[in-house]
Image (cartoon, rainbow, N blue to C red):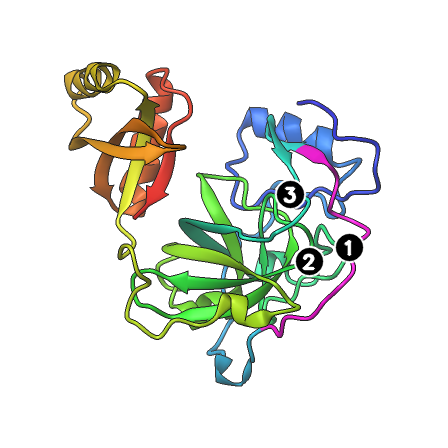
Amino acid sequence: MSTPPAIAYPLPPLRRALLGSAAVALLASLWACSSKPVVIGEPQDGAPAGTVDVSRIADAVPRVEARSRYGNPPQYTVLGRSYQTMTASTGYVERGIASWYGTKFHGRRTSSGEPYDMYAMTAAHKTLPLPTYVRVTNLRNGRSVVVRVNDRGPFVKDRVIDLSYAAAIKLGVSQTGTAPVEVRAIDPSTPTSGVKRTDAAPAGGNGTIFLQVGAFAHRANAEQLRARLLRIEVQPVEIQEAVSRDRPVFRVRVGPLDVAQADRVSESLAQEGHDGVHIVVD
């Protein structure tokens, strides 16, 4: 694992990582720079005991804030993968899989230096500036919330955002654990930039999950990859034709899948030597 730049930046806890021998060695190397080390044998993350009424918990209110002193290095490395921190969130929109974190990290220091409060409307993101306000919409049920991104993560299984427990409940994610979402940055100087949608699902899809295995400028290359995937019994496989930067692109995708299927197939493809496989949500 390469070393992040010399900067006062607490790496976030490794959420839900499987603690095998390799992970144990990695965690030992991170303890010196982690604000809260992960201890082998700690309780699993989860929900608090009892019922939580989130109806009284208001969405985060966007306001202009200075960039956090912590958590905004130009780049950092976790689990052998490097991330480039965005210099601005203007125009950011992304679809992917949301997860959430709760009791295990409640009260611990986030990457911005603030304590994590699972009852606050916050979230963790790998590359957005800290803090950033975003509107998160569950593409399966149309629910939408505004959260303040003040932490880094999630770093497992190709997730796009890690929600606080309160935000997960309001979005209907707490029971399923994950959900396809759209994440849209809000400009706090003009907060209507993240205006709430009222339709059952945002325009342009309903959260259908695919694994993108490759993208090519020529269809013949896409057909070759599709044939290889079918030979190893990965299916269904489709070739999606699109336009990127005024040029045709042919994307090889497996699906539709649910989240658990996408995780399993992604791991299997990685073992077969297919690098760069990632989840896409329509």
Q: Which residue range is magenta in the image?
A: 60-76
> Is 280 within the magenta?
no
Answer whether residue 53 is visible to the viewer in this image.
no
Comparing 15 with 204, the one in front is 204
Residue 131, numbered circle: 2
Q: Is 67 inside the magenta-drawn segment?
A: yes
Answer with mark 1 or mark 2, whichever residue precedes in sequence. 1
- Name the kind of residue labelled 2 in the image: Pro
The mark lying in front, picked from 3 and 1, is 3
- 91 relative to 20, above or below: below
Residue receiving disc 1: 68
> Image quarter for residue 170?
bottom left
Q: Quadrant of the N terminus?
A: top right
Distance between the alpha carbons at the discs numbered 2 and 3: 11 Å
Per the image, label 1 sits on a secondary structure element best described as loop
Q: Amino acid at mark 1?
A: Ser
State the separation of the CA atoms marked 1 and 2.
Answer: 6 Å
Q: Earlier in the sequence, mark 2 or mark 3?
A: 3
Please tell me which of labels 3 and 1 falls first in the chain. Answer: 1
- Give coordinates of residue 77: x percent, y percent: 66, 31
Residue 89 seen in this snapshot: yes
The percent coordinates of residue 281 (x first, y second) are: 33, 46
Q: Are marks 3 and 1 in contact (CB under 8 Å)?
A: no
